[in-house]
Image: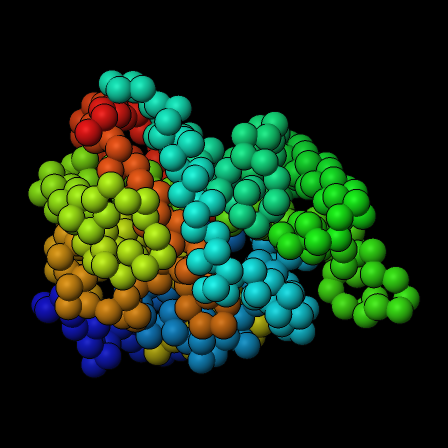
Amino acid sequence: MSDSSGDPSEKPRGGVGDERRPPAPAGLPLLGNAVGFARDPFEFTVDAVEEVGDAFRIDLPVGDRYVLAHPDYAERVLVTDRDAFAKTDDFPLAFGNSVIAVEGDDWREQRDFLDPFFFASRIQSFLPTMREQVVRRADSWTDGQEIALLSEMQELTFDILATTLLGIDAGADRDGLRAAADDLNAYFEPVTWMLPDWLPTPARRRFDAAKATLREEVYSLLENADRTAADDPAEGVDLVATLATALNADASDDADSYPRETDAAIDQLIGLVFAGHETTALALTFTLYCLTENPEAYRRVEAELDDVLGDDPIRWEHLDDLPTLARVVDESLRLYPPVHALPRETKHPVRFDDDVVPEGAEVLVSVFAMHHDERFWDDPTTFDPTRWRDRDRSADAYLPFGAGPRRCLGATFARVEARVALAELLRRFRFERVGDGALSLSPQMTTQPAGEVPMIVRRR
């Protein structure tokens, strides 16, 4: 099947016959699909599409989940029929009333408030700071050093977030903030949400502690920004300072505009801290891993960087002249999408061809399954950046940043950040993976490597 097809006439696989719920793959008595899903959710989902269709049910002792794994279905959930679906309770549980979690007018108000921070002109102004932080990180490594790649990329992307959007110093003592964000992410492992809500577990205790820590850390950011803005109002150009200034609007200002209370600002920053560095750190980790496993692609990227940049620092105008690098990032995001599924909840029964998902059901739009489906991609498990020479990133089966009005607000920021980081790192070092074998994955709220990804860095 052609890699560039995405043919809308290719009908989703699905059920036939009378109205029914989507079918479930074969499972075990009492346990249903719990064992297979817990063992490897990614493999389970891809196999289930082959076994029972693009709309299927995960049969779990604590209640069913529904998975949709076809571009036509994704478009309905995220675009054309989006009003039939709400964000699940997981979002406000983790991120309160932030733009990630809220709906309707609240979402529109927050999105309007945040949009200017992600305009192309603002991102362009951030690029020198992004580069500065990448060089700072690279300068901390020595020739032949073994690094824990994921941790290094998490620290790097947090420092970039801190110095661009948050207005705090790179390397500031924010270990508690990062550790709490990690615990928040880990809570959403399938094993956790396959257990009853009332059951206390270590993961849930860590989750509660992480939320408390995040709120304390973020509140201190707001307090510091408030003091800085009071001393020098011209400094209030980053998001934290803007939120702090808005909270202190007096009666003569538009005091009814967002945010109206400190808790709202804290929720927003917690969502930003999580979404603003974790996903890009994963994208960088997976991309560098893919390059070390594919020497020819690695060689082409290095040659392009040497040819286009020479000894010059990367600038905004260079980005369009690095198509090989862009394709490598695109392909990494396809093979290892940092956000592997997009959860929603049905507001009323919704029909998908011959199957009906009931009201109040949790629905997962499986980005991972669509990205690994041979109907839409030639050799879908193979890392092949050249497929992007003739394929548009807007192809329906490619959703690393979601789709529709709720598409990731920071998508452009993340793509620029990833290319800047890779360009400066790959010019300075050659990365060599420690160990061999396929990379195992762990599905939390994001797609995580199952453990660290050790690398040797050697100066070029």
**Quadrant hosting residue 10:** bottom left
Return the x and y of residue 46 as percentages of the image width and height. 27, 53
The answer to whether residue 444 is above or below residue 26 is above
Instruction: State the residue at coordinates (68%, 36%).
Output: 217
Is residue 417 shown left or right of residue 395? right
Return the x and y of residue 69 as percentages of the image width and height. 33, 63
Is residue 164 shown left or right of residue 19? right
**Quadrant hosting residue 112:** bottom right
Q: Which residue lies furthest to the right in this view?
A: 251
Residue 263 visible in the shown view: no
**Quadrant hosting residue 246:** bottom right
The answer to whether residue 269 is above or below residue 174 is below
Of residue 293 and residue 450, the one placed in the foreground of this image is 293
Q: Quadrant of the C terminus?
A: top left
Return the x and y of residue 353 as percentages of the image width and height. 35, 78
Residue 155 visible in the shown view: yes
Instruction: State the residue at coordinates (57%, 65%).
Output: 116
Instruction: State the residue at coordinates (51%, 53%).
Output: 63
Of residue 358 and residue 135, the one placed in the foreground of this image is 135
Is residue 242 shown left or right of residue 115? right
Instruction: State the residue at coordinates (61%, 40%).
Output: 168
